[in-house]
Amino acid sequence: MTQTSDIPQRRTLARIGHFVAVRRKLVFDYFSAISGAGGRLVFSLAYFVALANTLSIAEFGMFATASAAGVMLSRVLAFGFISALYRTATIRPNLIGTFTAGFLFLGVISLPVLAAASYAVYLIFFASTVPLSVFAAVVFAEALLWRPVEVVLIVNNGLGKFGRAAVLTILATAFRAVGAVLFMLAAQRTIGVWSWFYIGANAASLIVAFAFFYPRQRLRLRTELYFRRLADSIYVAGSEVLFYLQMEFDKLLVLSIGGPHLAGIYAIIMRLVDLTAIPIRTFSMMLVQRMMRAPELLSRLAVKSGIEGGVFVVSTLALLLLGIVLHFFPNALGGNVAEAAPLVALAVCVPGLRNLVEYQAELLFARGQTAVRAINLGLLAGLKAVLLNYVLTTIPDTPDLVLSFNIVFLLLYLASMLLTYSAMRRPAKAI
């Protein structure tokens, strides 16, 4: 016979068991996802070292800037309907086939808009420095080959299949690394030749992604369902374009104001900064999924400040460690990278502040506040343009210029924090 005094104890043990079980799954999911980030980090570093030391610094700057523009322009594909596909995978996975058909349908319709936008960006930023054929090849690789690979990753993450997404992430990054190594062995090693290797590496990723990693569901075209969500998708597409514009606008300005060589040095520094964001993006992705189901997750100030402090500390320590290594071993990542090695540590606060701006933008997406997110990112893009134009035109010394970016990104972070948390006082929108 059960004693009455045993009941509270058993209930307490049951609660503890449930708490541990839930956290165990969360930890397992995170390590499944972070394994992909770790593999991506390794192959991204190999890819970066091979490419940065094969192309000249000027050509590497041209490619990195064209690639950044291609990533931004790729958000035009399907008018941002990828966001609806992600929400569907997260909340209503039985409709993935229907929304995949919508993505393909809207993707075809968006191609003329994507082409026109790409040509306009080329005329504004690249006409005097990058051949049109190279720019078109890079945008094609980013928008029509790599962006669909990201769709496969997004859908698998939405379904909670973090292990499968991790494997695909590693394979896709490995294809790029292999492409860069093969390019090192090519008879001609110009940016024009590399653009074809880049297309090949991304095409291989696309084939593997849809052949082996996309969930098998029958495609059903239901146009009325898509147009009902098109306004929200366009908001997301606009905000994504603005997000990458404010993230990558520095590269465009450095190329147009400072020329290809300075753009190459800057691209090397910022590529190393980007590597610190890989684990942070995994954390942000999982937090966004939880906020879709529980929008009030960050209602407490202690939780918000704790997460932001962790993001900043991890990002800063990562760059400091890299800066120390390059200080004592400047040729560790190759001869071309050695030219930028003394400048890396000067950007000490940039990774943390940059990652925090990215993280805050994801919070509004998780809460369904896509229109506000687009407005905020537009304001940040304008502010960044003003600040960067000022420092690029008034500071001629490269070390001082890199040091000044800490102030630029601090001001951007403060503006982002004010805009984001002001918006989060409003109720989250139903998804």
Image (cartoon, helix red, strand yellow):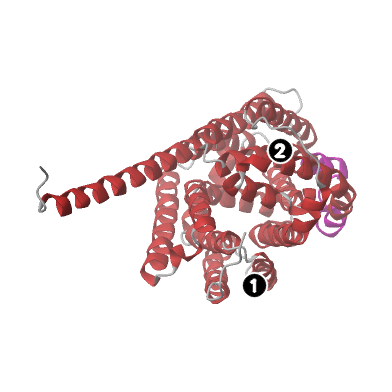
- Few, some or many residues within 10 Å of mark 1 (<14, 14–19, 20+): some
Q: How many labels were placed on the picture?
A: 2
Task: Check contact, mark 1 vs mark 2: CB within 8 A.
Answer: no
Which residue is found at the position 81% from the left and 55% from the top? 227
Residue 327: x and y, percent?
43, 48
Q: What is the number of the mark on residue 387? A: 1
Q: Secondary structure at mark 1?
A: helix
Magenta-span inclusion, residue 175: no
Write down the region rendered in magenta.
120-139
Q: Position of residue 406 (x, y in %)?
A: 52, 66
Q: Identify the mark nearer the N-term, 1 or 2.
A: 2
Whole-percent x, y for residue 271 in the image? 58, 48
Distance, label 1 to label 2, CA atoms, is 45 Å
Height in image: 63 above or below 165? below
132 inside magenta stretch:
yes
Q: Residue furthest front?
A: 1
Quadrant of the image containing the C terminus: bottom right
Query: Which circle marks residue 404 in the picture?
Result: none
Q: Which residue is mark 2?
A: 97
